[in-house]
Amino acid sequence: MGTENQQEEWYKKAASYQIVGCYAQTELGHGSDVQNLETTATYVPENDTFIINTPTISAAKYWPGDLGITCTHALVFAQLIIY
């Protein structure tokens, strides 16, 4: 996924272990029920970024393999908010 430029940049870094990622979908209170995730990602167009918010303990990401050990990046599933 992504543009050719994005694929070029991120694939090289991942293939050479400059970055190591994990997948963070499952929430403590919701399992893998993506329709009810509490974590939100609010898009900020002024600086082309996202604000990630995990508002409650039940929204904590659970079992994101190696997140606390080796990962430098995470693919975080969240409810997208755009104003």
Image (tube, helix red, strand yellow):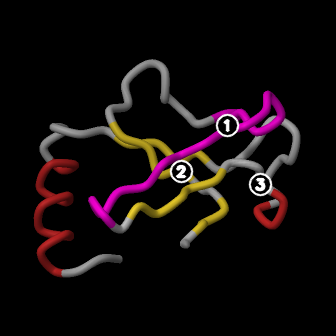
- Determine whether, in the image, residue 44 is placed left or right of residue 24: left
Q: Name the quarter where the N terminus is drawn.
A: bottom left
Looking at the rendering, which quadrant does residue 69 occupy? Answer: top left
Taking 27 as reference, is 67 above or below it? above
Query: Residue sitting at 84 percent across and 59 percent down?
Result: 36
Asked if the magenta segment contains residue 3, the reply would be no
Taking 33 as reference, is 3 above or below it? below
Q: Name the quarter where the C terminus is drawn.
A: bottom right
**Residue type marked 1:** Lys
Mark 1 or mark 3, which is nearer to you? Answer: 3
* First along the sequence among labels 1 and 3: 3
Residue 10 x/y as whole percent = 19, 58
Residue 27 x/y as whole percent = 76, 42
Spatial distance from mark 2 to mark 3, Cα to Cα? 11 Å
* First along the sequence among labels 2 and 1: 1
For the residue labelled by badge 2, is the local secondary structure a helix, a strand or a loop? strand
Residue 74 x/y as whole percent = 44, 43
Spatial distance from mark 2 to mark 1, Cα to Cα? 9 Å
Q: Can you identify the residue that label 3 sits on?
A: 37
For the magenta stretch, what is the residue range?
A: 46-63
Residue 29 x/y as whole percent = 88, 39
Q: Are marks 1 and 3 in contact (CB under 8 Å)?
A: no
**Residue type marked 2:** Val
Q: Can you identify the residue that label 1 sits on?
A: 61
- Determine whether, in the image, residue 27 is placed left or right of residue 21: right
Asked if the magenta segment contains residue 55, the reply would be yes
Q: Can you identify the residue that label 2 sits on?
A: 76
